[in-house]
Each structure stands twice: as structure tokens, then as C-alpha cells.
Image: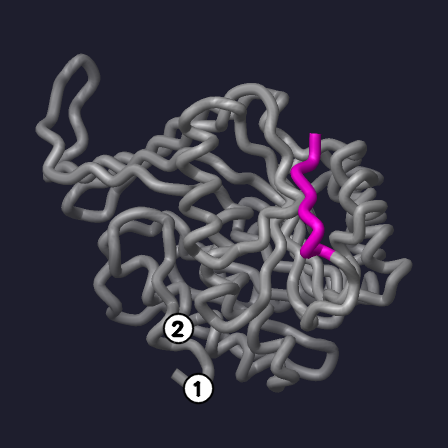
Amino acid sequence: MIAHSEDSSPGRSSGVVVVGQAARDLVLRTEHLPEPNGDAAVAETIETLGGKGANQSVGLRQLGASVRLLAVLGTDAAGDDAARTATSDGIDLDWLVRRGTTALLVDVVDADASRFLLERVPDDSLVVEDDVRAAVAAGVLDGCDTVVLQLQQPPTTVLEAARAARERGLRVVIDGGLEGGARDEALGLADVVRADATEARMLTGTSLSSPDEARAAAASILSAGVSVVALTVEGEGDLVAWPDGDAFFAFGDAHVVDPTGAGDAFVAGLVTGLRLELHPGAAGELAHRAAAATVGRVGGRPDLRHIAPGA
């Protein structure tokens, strides 16, 4: 069931719709990760709202956007807590779906920024086509200019949302990787594509071990009609490309505490810059700063208020 309030009528200020994952995020910081069958003391524990959709929504809101989140939280106490956090973040939850059990993400990170991620993502915690149709019929896209889609949702969900956004002339941003026919249709519907090295291999069939390889991969994605492509070269930096140019943003010497959430913050910065009609290179610079700010703290939840335009 969609929780939809009377306040969600058309005519509100232009904003962003994020379709993606919301979850309970448990972050455990330790001095060292345990060996198999070993143990390690936990130095810090953080429990909060997480998931790619929620993290991107928080980042976009901190950077000044009005944000509507279409996601699923369980009917359990964890879902109640996550919904309260999202509301306090200023995210519009009029189209939040409540059912089943809230997804759980466990991020374990050590002093060297090595980490592993454990996920419990029940099928009923994913956004499905019917959720998208119901939200669109209820007006989730009204008065908005951009839709951000994470491709970790079912391909049918992503395509349903992308088609609805494209029909209304909204900017379509996809984040992640798809294969086969779903990939081809998604790229044909997208204005902006962001992918890490693994996801870019899914999209293009090529590896990204250097900026030049990223440029070649970006060119193949741009040829599908995409306007802006952002690809990560693992260990080196992020490439942002557009039809007549590109910019590469090296990771540099920034101290990394936890790499979790860097991509989500990057998406929030990139979308913010493009919505402000910045040149793609300048939007990429804002995205790079957002990602750098996030890896400097524990957990994937961003804090981008200090880099917000006009801050």
C-alpha cells in the first residue's frame, strides 16, 4: 500500500524523484577485520537509514533539492525508525510503500578503510512495477524535473519508471549496470548514466582499468543518445563525459575512512549540478567533492551541507 497524503498535489516546487532502496543500515567500525573463525572488537556502531535510494535522497536534499522517495520499508520497527529518520531529513515520503520486512545492510570497516558488506534484502523490500504504476497515478512525477533510478531494483521496475518519466519529458538518471535487452532499453531512455567499474563492464562489455578505457566505454554509452556519462576507474578516479568532451577527476590524496556511499554522494552532486544547469564538467566537480566528503566519514550516509551551492 502507498502512504499518500493530501499534500502531494501538483504544483509544488520542481524537484527530484528517487526510485530505489531504503533500508536499515548498521555500520560497524573495527581496528581490523577478523580472520576466518576469528573475532575483532567493534570500536563504533552506527544504526541509521541506509540503502542507495535513501542515501541519494539525503544527499540531494542536503544539496538543496526537494526530494520524493519511492522505496519500500517494512511494517516492522526498523521500518518505522527509518521512516522517521527520512522525514527528519526533509524527504517527502508520500509515496513510500510499507510491507514485509525492512532490508538490512551491515557495513564492517577497519582502520585501513577495508570493508565488507552483508545484505539481507527480501524480495518484498524491492520496488516493483505495480508500485511505480500506483505512484505515477497518484502524482509522484507531477511538478518534478528529474527521476533518479538505481539499477539494483528489478529491471522491469527501472524500465517502468524510466518510460513514465520520459513520457513526461523529465530528466532520467540511471545508476548501476544492466545486461541484455533491459540494458539497451534503459540506455535509450536515459539522459544521464553513472556506473562504477563493474557496472560499466555490464553496460559496455569492456573493462575500465584506465581513463582511456573509461573514455572508450563512455563513448559507447553516449552513442545510445545519453547526454552525460560518469564512470569510475577503480583506484584512480571518475570520468565525466559528454558528447563533445570529458573531464577526469583523480581520487588524489584524500584520506579514506570508509568507501561506502561514495557513489551515492557522487550521483547526488552530479544531479544537483545538472539541475542547476552547470556545464557537465562543473557538475562533475561538484560530484567529485561530494564523494570525497563522504569517504572521509564512517558509513554511507552523506553530510554534504557544507558543499551545497550557496553554502
Residue 226 percent across, percent down from the top left: 77, 66
User: Which residue is at the far top?
Assistant: 37
Q: Quadrant of the C terminus?
A: bottom left
Which three-letter amino acid code belongs to the residue tagged 2? Arg
In this rendering, position of residue 40 left or right of residue 259: left
Which one is in front, 229 or 192?
Answer: 192
Residue 176 visible in the snapshot: no
Cα gap from disc 1 to disc 2, whole angstroms: 15 Å
Q: How is the image coloured?
A: one colour
Q: Residue at x 76, y 66 (%)?
A: 143
Residue 187 visible in the snapshot: yes
In this rendering, position of residue 211 left or right of residue 130: left
Q: Secondary structure at mark 1?
A: loop
- Is 120 rendered above or below residue 278? above
Where residue 82 sits, quadrant-wise, is top left
Which one is in front, 226 or 72?
Answer: 72
Q: Which residue is mark 2?
A: 289
Where residue 107 sits, quadrant-wise, is top left
Q: What number is the disc on residue 310?
A: 1
Mark 1 burial class by Cα count in 10 Å: few <14, some 14-19, many 20+: few
* Number of residue marks: 2
Q: Secondary structure at mark 2?
A: helix
Which three-letter amino acid code belongs to the residue tagged 1? Gly
- Is 190 rendered above or below residue 186? below
Q: What number is the disc on residue 268?
A: none
Which range is magenta? Answer: 1-8
Q: Residue at x 23, y 35 (%)?
A: 28
